[in-house]
Image (tube, rainbow, N blue to C red):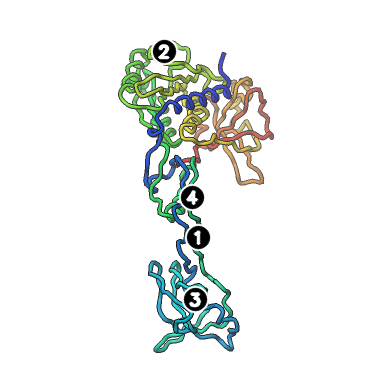
C-alpha cells in the first residue's frame, strides 16, 4: 500500500533528524565572508559588539551651534555665529567647554556622520546648511533666522543598534538587507550551514544510446533545481538500465566523497527495466518508502544508504519529467530545507478560475482534474496576483506527467489534497514554481 503524502513527509523529517543527530557539529558549518553569505543560512545568533553610532554624530551637513542662543532668532533679528573650524566624517572631534571663547556665539561646520564637538551643553545641535545664510569675511559667519530645537539633527551614541543586541538570528536566510547592520557593527564574516551536497543521475538506455534521439530533461533540470533550493549539486551523467551499472555508479560515489543526497530519475516503477530498488538493496539500503499517494509521481522512492561518511539520503524519482519535477518540489526540496534549518514553504491561497483552458483535447482521462481522488494531486498552474484577490487556473496545454507545454507558462503548482474534489471557484493551495526563498 502506498504511503500518504503527509506520512512520506513525516518520514523525511525523521530521516533528516536522524542523520543530523549523528553528525559531528563542527562539520555542519563553515565561515564565509558577508559578500559570499547571500542565500546561506546563519548557523547562530550574532550580537553587536558595539553600539551604533559609537559617538554622537550629525545627521545633516550644517553647523554645530548652541541651540539656546537661537531662541529669539527671527528673519528681522537673526543670530550670528562665527565659523571656528570644520569637522568631517572620520575626523577627531573638537573639545569645547563653556569657558572657551569659541563657545560664545561660535559654531563649527560639521558634515553628515561627523562626530559632534565634545561638551553637549555647548554646541548641542546642528542647524542645516539650507537654514542659514553664510556671510563672507576675515572670520566667516552664518546667520540663523529661526529657533533651532535642542539637539536638532543630532544622532546620539547607541540610538541605532545597542551593544549586545541581536543583529542576525540563527536560521536567517541571508539577503542583501542583512549585510548592512552586520557590516555597520564590524562583523565581516559569519558561520553558515554548509550546503547539502547532492549528486544526480539520469537512468535509461534511451539516454545513453548514441542512436537514440531522446533528450535528457531530468538531469539538467534536477541539477538546476537542486542549486535553486540551496544545495551544492553535481550531475553525474546517465546510467544504463542495468542493475550492475546502477550499483557500480552509486557505490563509486558513496566510497569516494561525502554526499548528503543522491537522486536518480527513472527506473523506480515495476517495469522490466526498473532496477533502482534492486540496486539499492544490493548496496544495503534501508527502503523508507516506495510509492506515495500522489499524482504525478506515484512510484517515487526514498531510502537511506550506508557509506563510510555516514548515511546518505536517496531519492528515486520517476522518469517522466513532470512527475520528477512534482516529486522534487514536494518531497526533495522539503528535505533539503530540513538540512538547511529552514521552515517548510507555506502555500498561497488563490481562487480557482478554470480547469479547461484551451481546446477540448485537454479533456482526456489522464488530464481529468478529479482523477485519483485518493491521492494528493499537483498541477502546473498560472497564478495571477493583479486582481482584487489571487486567482489561478490550469496552465495551457494537455496535462500529463510527460507533457512539457504546460510548463511554458506555469508559474505555480496547484495542490489538491487527497479526497478533495476540485471545482472552479474554490480556494486552492498554490506554491511558486520556483523557490523564492533562496538565491
Q: Residues within 10 Å of mark 2 (few under 14, many from 20)?
A: some
Q: Is any part of residue 385 visible from this angle?
A: yes
Q: Residue at x 39, y 19 (%)?
A: 306
Please tell me the numbered disc located at residue 291.
none
First in residue order: circle 2 vs circle 3: 3
Q: Are marks 4 and 3 in contact (CB under 8 Å)?
A: no
The secondary structure type at the circle numbered 3 is loop
Label 1 sits on residue: 158
Q: Nearest to the eye among marks 2 and 1: give it.
A: 1
Question: In which quadrant will I find the C terminus?
Answer: top left
Q: Are marks 2 and 1 in contact (CB under 8 Å)?
A: no
First in residue order: circle 1 vs circle 4: 1
Q: Of residues 436 and 36, which is closer to you in this image?
A: 36
First in residue order: circle 4 vs circle 3: 3
Q: Residue at x 45, y 69 (%)?
A: 112
Please tell me the numbered disc located at residue 123.
3
Q: Tell me how far mark 2 sits from mark 1, CA to CA.
A: 62 Å
Q: Nearest to the eye among marks 2 and 3: give it.
A: 3
Task: Judge from the rendering whether residue 259 lies leftward or rightward of residue 290; answer left or right.
Answer: left
Label 4 sits on residue: 167
Residue 294, image quadrant = top right
Q: Tell me how far mark 1 sits from mark 4, CA to CA.
A: 14 Å
Seen from this angle, which residue lies furthest top?
272
Q: Nearest to the eye among marks 4 and 3: give it.
A: 3
Task: Judge from the rendering whether residue 300 lies leftward or rightward of residue 190; answer left or right.
Answer: right
The secondary structure type at the circle numbered 2 is helix
First in residue order: circle 4 vs circle 2: 4
Residue 82, image quadrant = bottom left
Q: Tell me how far mark 4 sits from mark 3, CA to CA.
A: 32 Å
Q: Position of residue 117 (x, y in %)?
A: 45, 73
Please tell me the numbered disc located at residue 281.
2
Q: Residue at x 41, y 32 (%)?
A: 25
Amino acid at each position: 500500500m502506498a504511503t500518504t503524502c503527509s506520512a512520506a513527509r513525516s518520514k523525511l523529517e525523521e530521516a533528516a533528524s536522524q542523520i543530523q543527530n549523528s553528525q559531528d557539529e563542527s562539520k555542519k558549518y563553515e565561515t564565509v565572508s558577508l559578500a559570499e553569505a547571500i542565500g546561506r543560512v546563519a548557523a547562530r545568533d550574532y550580537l553587536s559588539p558595539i553600539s551604533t553610532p559609537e559617538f554622537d554624530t550629525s545627521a545633516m551637513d550644517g553647523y554645530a551651534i548652541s541651540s539656546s542662543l537661537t531662541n529669539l532668532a527671527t528673519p528681522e533679528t537673526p543670530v550670528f555665529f562665527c565659523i571656528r573650524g570644520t569637522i568631517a566624517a572620520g575626523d577627531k572631534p573638537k573639545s569645547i567647554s563653556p569657558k572657551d571663547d569659541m563657545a560664545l556665539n561660535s559654531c563649527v561646520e560639521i558634515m553628515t556622520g561627523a562626530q559632534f564637538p565634545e561638551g553637549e551643553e555647548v554646541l548641542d545641535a546642528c542647524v542645516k546648511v539650507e537654514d542659514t545664510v553664510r556671510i563672507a569675511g576675515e572670520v566667516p559667519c552664518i546667520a540663523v533666522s529661526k529657533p533651532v530645537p535642542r539637539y536638532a539633527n543630532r544622532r546620539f551614541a547607541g540610538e541605532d543598534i545597542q551593544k549586545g543586541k541581536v543583529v542576525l538570528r540563527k536560521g536567517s536566510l541571508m539577503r542583501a538587507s542583512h549585510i548592512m547592520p552586520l557590516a555597520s557593527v564590524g562583523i565581516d564574516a559569519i558561520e553558515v550551514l554548509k550546503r547539502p551536497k547532492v549528486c544526480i543521475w539520469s537512468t535509461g538506455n534511451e539516454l545513453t544510446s548514441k542512436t537514440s534521439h531522446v533528450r535528457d530533461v531530468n538531469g539538467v533540470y534536477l541539477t538546476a533545481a537542486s542549486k535553486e533550493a540551496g544545495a551544492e549539486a553535481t550531475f553525474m551523467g546517465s546510467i544504463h538500465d542495468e542493475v550492475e551499472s546502477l550499483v557500480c555508479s552509486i557505490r563509486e560515489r558513496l566510497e569516494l566523497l561525502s554526499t548528503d543526497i543522491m537522486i536518480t530519475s527513472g527506473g523506480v516503477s515495476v517495469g522490466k527495466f526498473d532496477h533502482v530498488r534492486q540496486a539499492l538493496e544490493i548496496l544495503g539500503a534501508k527502503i523508507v518508502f516506495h510509492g506515495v499517494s500522489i499524482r504525478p509521481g506515484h512510484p517515487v522512492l526514498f531510502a537511506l544508504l550506508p557509506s563510510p561518511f555516514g548515511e546518505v539520503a536517496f531519492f528515486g524519482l520517476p522518469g517522466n519529467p513532470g512527475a520528477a519535477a512534482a516529486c522534487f518540489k514536494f518531497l526533495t526540496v522539503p528535505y533539503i530545507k530540513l538540512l538547511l534549518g529552514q521552515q517548510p514553504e507555506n502555500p498561497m491561497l488563490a481562487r480557482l478560475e478554470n480547469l479547461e483552458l484551451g481546446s477540448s483535447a485537454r479533456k482526456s482521462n489522464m488530464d481529468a482534474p478529479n482523477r485519483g481522488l485518493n491521492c494528493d494531486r499537483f498541477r502546473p498552474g498560472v497564478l495571477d496576483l493583479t486582481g482584487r484577490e489571487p486567482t489561478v487556473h490550469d496552465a495551457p496545454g494537455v496535462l500529463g506527467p510527460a507533457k512539457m507545454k504546460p510548463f511554458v507558462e506555469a508559474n505555480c503548482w496547484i495542490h489538491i489534497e487527497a479526497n478533495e474534489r476540485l471545482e472552479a471557484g474554490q480556494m486552492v493551495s498554490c506554491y511558486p514554481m520556483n523557490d523564492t526563498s533562496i538565491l
